[in-house]
Image (cartoon, rainbow, N blue to C red):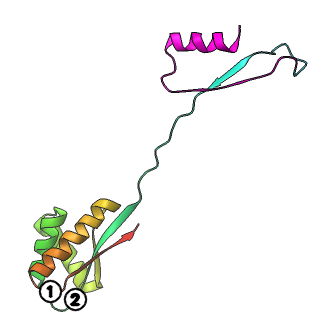
């Protein structure tokens, strides 16, 4: 059976939806009886997981605690209790994590928080860092 016949048979069987590569052994290239046989392989693409980024709030001496709690509730969908805990962590440690997101989502959250803080005339800082 020739390589072309094998490829036609495989296509008719519908076993390969994606293109495949065929490699064959040229006739008379070895001492074995397999001259003219084909090896059909199929590659499977592997998706790489996206990098994750931490969104962090930075402490300052001017932004009211209630405003920080409101920001965490509004932009990070946290309950009031969780938002309060995050705010207290930021207050005591100087920095606190609000969430972990893909790059685009993290960048959007940082921009939203910074714009909201500026609009309300608060110096609150929000940054992102690779996890």
Q: Give the secondary structure at mark 1.
A: loop
Magenta stretch: give its range.
Answer: 1-28
Lateral position of residue 1 relative to residue 76, left or right: right
Query: Could you say which quadrant of the image residue 125 lies in?
Result: bottom left
Question: In the rendered structure, does residue 4 fall within the stretch colored magenta?
Answer: yes
Question: In the rendered structure, does residue 126 fall within the stretch colored magenta?
Answer: no
Residue ID for mark 2: 60
Total residue callouts: 2
Residue ID for mark 1: 63
Up the image or down, 31 lies above or below 120; here it is: above
Task: Name the residue: 65% across, 13% down.
Answer: 4
**x and y percentages locating residue 127 in the rendered image:** 30, 75
Q: Are marks 2 and 1 in contact (CB under 8 Å)?
A: yes
Up the image or down, 41 lies above or below 73; here it is: above
**x and y percentages locating residue 30 in the rendered image:** 88, 21
Query: Could you say which quadrant of the image residue 121 lies in?
Result: bottom left
For disc 1, the neighbor class at 10 Å (few under 14, some 14 to 19, many from 20) is some
For disc 2, the neighbor class at 10 Å (few under 14, some 14 to 19, many from 20) is some
Whether residue 102 is visible: no
């Amino acid at each position: 059976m020739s390589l072309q016949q094998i490829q036609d048979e495989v296509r008719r069987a519908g076993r390969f939806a994606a293109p495949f590569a065929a490699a064959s052994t040229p006739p008379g290239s070895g001492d074995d009886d397999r001259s003219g046989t084909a090896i059909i392989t199929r590659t499977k693409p592997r998706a790489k997981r996206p990098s994750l980024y931490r969104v962090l709030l930075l402490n300052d001496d001017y932004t009211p605690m209630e405003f920080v709690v409101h920001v965490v509730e509004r932009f990070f969908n946290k309950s009031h209790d969780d938002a309060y805990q995050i705010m207290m962590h930021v207050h005591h440690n100087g920095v606190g994590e609000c969430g972990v997101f893909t790059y685009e989502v993290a960048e959007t959250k940082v921009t939203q928080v910074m714009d909201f803080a500026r609009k309300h005339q608060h110096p609150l800082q929000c940054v992102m860092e690779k996890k």
